[in-house]
Amino acid sequence: MDKLTISRRMVVKAGAALVLAVTSFASLPAHAESTLERAKAQGYIRVGFANEAPFGYATPDGKLTGEAPEVAKAVLAKMGIQQVDGVLTEFGSLIPGLKAGRFDIIAAGMFINPKRCAEINFSEPSYGIGQAMLVTKGNPKGIKDYSSIKDNPDLKLAVMAGAVEAGYAKDAGIGEGQLVILPDQSSLVAAVQSGRADAASLTALSIADMAKKADGVESTKPFGEVAGKSVKGHGGFGFRKEDTDLQEAFNAELKKFIGSPEHIALVEQFGFGKDYLPNKTTADLCAGK
């Protein structure tokens, strides 16, 4: 066999090997772009909020603001994502909306609890807070907390659909017939103002904000226990189960941010501050501790 024949065969073999390599790479599955990768490439991300001041709401001119959106904006900016678009959603539809892909993060001050942790992932908490009730001016029926409603079967309590307060009411022994389930804050206020409900329950900051803005109503003194159990809720940001890279990157920046002078200055305008810093981890809250 001459040298020319050997060379030709080597070229043929090399060409065949190259074709095989190209074919092998072509058969590999394409890398699916993650939510984090897409957001960084596009420079923006969508967050769901429920128009619940001071946690997350839209101003009359359409600006997305509140404790959760502003913290999210600050954290996401540190991740290289400069634009945050809000998607207004009823509170009870936030988790379904996240899972359906209508938005990529829940930024609504949502309490972290085991039931919600089974459906979505959460960041570490950004705040911790107790409860209060909205009542008519002067509090003529002497309502203090959930036990006041339990002790008087004639009283009605308004709660927001999908929020934790319905569970607190059940824990306190309040019957379903005493509950008025409503979609949002404005409905809660209207129910108390009209007498459809004798009280409405939400976090202390939300109730204080509602009382400040509405006529004929006021807030009870905040409280931290229901039926002997702590109801100091801790709120965080929600993520789809598959978006672990987004959650981890967000958490890394959030942990450095919470409690910093920059953070405190940002959230004080919404009534938050050093007195509302979290004192539990997401792992504990998801475990029901």
Image: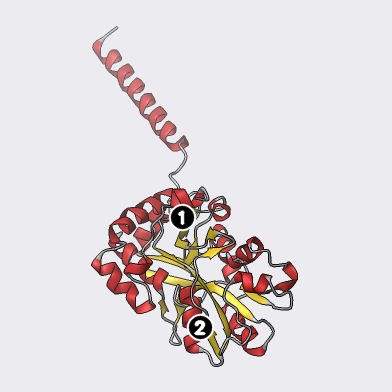
Q: Quadrant of residue 19?
A: top left
Q: Which residue is mark 1?
A: 122
For the point 44% across and 52% down, the residue is 282
Task: Pick the residue in front: 63 or 1.
Answer: 63
39 left or right, relative to 170: left
Instruction: Say if residue 243 shows up in the picture.
Output: no
Element type at mark 1: strand
First in sequence: mark 1 or mark 2? 1
What is the crowding at mark 2: few (fewer than 14 residues within 10 Å), some, or many (at least 20)? many
The disc labelled 2 sits on which kind of residue?
Answer: Met
Label number found at residue 9: none
Number of numbered discs overlaid on the protein picture: 2
Vertical comparison of 109 with 116: above or below: below
Element type at mark 2: helix
What is the crowding at mark 1: few (fewer than 14 residues within 10 Å), some, or many (at least 20)? many
Kindly report the distance in space between the C-alpha atoms of the residues bearing marks 1 and 2. 27 Å
Q: Which residue is mark 2?
A: 210
Q: Where does residue 250 sit, x and y in percent of width and height? A: 36, 56
Task: Pick the residue in front: 196 or 265.
Answer: 196
Vertical comparison of 174 with 214: above or below: above
Residues marked 1 and 2 touching at CB (< 8 Å): no
For the point 41% across and 54% down, the residue is 280
Vertical comparison of 140 with 56: above or below: below
The disc labelled 1 sits on which kind of residue?
Answer: Phe
